[in-house]
Image (cartoon, rainbow, N blue to C red):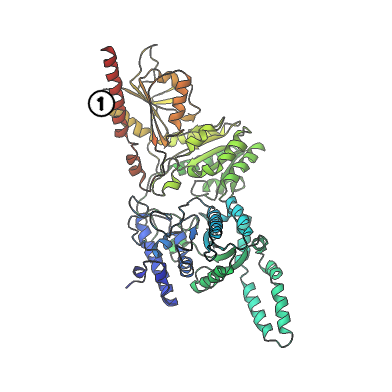
Amino acid sequence: MPLLTRIRGPRDLDRLTPGQLAALAEEIRGFLIEEVAKTGGHLGPNLGVVELTIALHRVFDSPRERILFDTGHQSYVHKLLTGRQDFSRLKMKGGLSGYPSRVESEHDVIENSHASTVLGYADGIAKANQLRGLTDCPVVAVTGDGALTGGMAWEALNNIADGRDRPVVIVVNDNERSYSPTIGGLANHLTTLRTTQGYERFLTWGRETLQRTPVVGQPLAGALHGAKKGLKDFIAPQGMFEDLGLKYLGPIDGHDIGALESALRKARGFGGPVIVHCITEKGRGYHAALQNDEDRFHAVGVIHPDTGLPVKSSGKDWTSVFGEEMVELGREREDIVAITAAMLHPVGLADFAKAFPARTFDVGIAEQHAAVSAAGLATAGLHPVVAVYATFLNRAFDQVLMDVALHKLGVTFVLDRAGVTGTDGASHNGMWDMSILQVVPGLRLAAPRDADQLRAQLREAVQVTDAPTVVRYSKGTVGPAVAALGRIGGMDVLHGSPDAVAPGERRADVLIVSVGALAPLCLEAAALLDAQGISATVVDPRWVKPVDPALPGLAAEHRVVVTVEDNGRVGGVGAAVAQALRDAEVDLPVRDFGIPQEFLDHAKREEILAEIGLTGPDIARQVTALVSRLDAAVVDARA
């Protein structure tokens, strides 16, 4: 009988022998490779933490003793050991989340899948435990060397160190990578620690030898103990942590369960803040992952488990279109520089970095710093392009507002995976950017509808030198080009006539303002309306902030205005259009379609769009009902 099927909770691990634990670790790796290959998911990170997660659950009593994961993409093993072994619908509707999920298990404490936050949680929980008198209840925070590049992690460390009697065990899962290889001064420091593991063995040998030496042995052993700090700084300079007041244990082989348990038990009994530095191998046990130097299969789609190759190839995606255009811009303009926050490959900047390594800056998981550093680059005469996932721009809002926009600096922010992203769940939907950025004075925001427009609008964005610009686009495959029939003001007409109409005449019944990649959906809605005798004009404003000055006049030639956006409805493009119409005294019904202001469960993008009513038929049905009510009101008024 397989060992894994006998594990229904962490305490089932207690009765296993060392040999059985090693066998269980191999079973788990085989399970992960087989199951994640069918669904896609975060494979490499989980293969690297198998032994570490087993040791954590053997030493600590979850859920009474809280085990927190940052960022949570390495929690699959934790799920298996806490009774969740049905991975058949991982990241799909109705299946397991790809991150810790409080609705799934009492063992999941936080659902954070934005990095560098777990130490702040740990600090708060430890303070609460102390106030409640739970002095024997350590808090365990599992973080990565990548997450430690984020400033929030160091703010938390500073506070954790202040609580000398608050038991917090910080487990640093050091695999030299976040998505890609970890960069920066901290990464170099941890590399030094990794490569000098001999000092502990040296100290142990010296202490044992001196203890056996008559007369002078004991005094010399004491002197050696007193000199340990200085010797450590000479051989392995982890003094940075100890100078903060944090006890340091390690480096520990993160694949040796016995060594891990020993270190974790020492940390557990210390009674204060402790760092346990574990060296792990991302993608361990899977040759295909280890051969993938880009990210060690950090996240994969559906793959062949034997080869690691995709089961099916998809068309060109938005990210690669951006990446190609950036290389072209780099060749044309020496002032173009690129910034990424630990996601060089995921945001499409790898080719730019290869072509222009001196003009590419990976700042680590530090979006705030990315924005301020970009402001500095712009101040000095360059044009920075900061590429991040849309959901991560939330973290840098203050810097966009007060450091870039206030100083009227030409910085371009490129937001990948904007709108509904689907399977990664609530934290990764890029549904906030067009709302929070509406309040930034002077900022211009583009939402390209296809690959051609992405290339064109990126070029338009980097021409702006006196204000921040934003270009946002969806996740996944970019669809076919959507041709424009003409242009009104700066807006492309996608359906209906672009020609001027006589004063007082109506162009069509409904004006549909289509935002970004939702253009095909809007064209479908327009066709359905036309079939019911309701005429429609569809325009793509291209730049959705500021509202095109020609839009109010165009709206006045219709009976109803409809906005359709892949963004939260509160404060988004629909709200801005409605405000512009009010300001222009164009009194028309405005119906805004977008994402409801709620945290969406994980599911495929198409499933989520259908659930929230962002489909062509849904929009056509509601607009038809609205026009029917307007017609009825006219009849009643005449009667």
Q: Does 35 sit above or below residue 499?
A: below
Instruction: Identify the image quadrant of the N terminus.
Output: bottom left
Q: Position of residue 72 (x, y in %)?
A: 47, 56
What residue is pinned by disc 1? 531
Percent across and percent down for residue 30 are 38, 66
Specify the quadrant that holds the C terminus: top left
- Residues 233 and 297: in front is 233
Quadrant of res 420: top left
Up the image or down, 21 lies above or below 163; here it is below
Instruction: Report whether residue 289 is seen.
Output: yes
Q: Is residue 277 left or right of residue 598?
A: right
Check disc 1 and give the amino acid type. Answer: Ala
Residue 550 visible somewhere in the drawing: no
**Residue drawn 50% across the image and 74% down it:** 258
User: Mark 1: few, some, or many residues within 10 Å (few <14, many ≥20)?
Assistant: few
Camera-nearest residue between 425 and 281? 425
